[in-house]
Image (tube, rainbow, N blue to C red):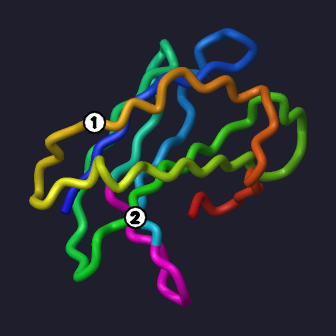
Amino acid sequence: QSASVRGMLMCHNRPAAHVSVKLYDDDSGPDLDDLMDQGETDAFGRFWLAGQESEFMTIDPKLNIYHDCDDNFTPCQRRIKIFLPKAYVTQGPTPHMVYDAGVIELSGKFADETRDCLHR
């Protein structure tokens, strides 16, 4: 199974360049999430990730964004999780559709936001 996501990250209406983004298959329980792809935003804050994972059940793709927008000197990075809709999961190794996360303004506060030092 496979999935793909793209988007643009901003910090105070400016492109958020070199922000770490990772695409995971979210696993519940004691298992660690499976990393499907990772990268950084470009100079314009844009990113595109695509990956695959073999699972018996349908994968649960999620995008993790690790950033320091509005973070000052607080240790670790802010982490935002965005779950992709199941409709964007492709049966097979190459995604047929790309989930467009749109333009995300990182200076806001997100309900399920956490802090992450290890980028998991």
Q: CA distance from mark 1 to mark 2?
A: 15 Å
Which residue lies at the image location 18% right of the left edge and 54% below the top edge? 90
Residue hosting label 2 = 60
Which corner quadrant of the image does residue 55 belong to?
Answer: bottom left
Mark 2 burial class by Cα count in 10 Å: few <14, some 14-19, many 20+: some
SS assignment for the magenta stretch, majority:
loop
The percent position of residue 28, horizontal first and vertical second, equals 51, 80
Residue hosting label 1 = 98
Q: Nearer the viewer, residue 51 or 103?
A: 103
The percent position of residue 72, horizontal first and vertical second, equals 89, 33
Classify residue 99 as left or right of residue 65: left
Which residue lies at the image location 40% right of the left edge and 64% below the top edge? 60
- The magenta segment is 27-36
Q: Among all residues in the image, which is located at the extreme right? A: 73
SS assignment at label 2: loop
**Considering the image in quadrants, where does the C terminus appear?**
bottom right
Asked if marks 1 and 2 touch (Cβ < 8 Å), the reply is no
Q: Among all residues in the image, which is located at the extreme front? A: 87
Mark 1 burial class by Cα count in 10 Å: few <14, some 14-19, many 20+: some
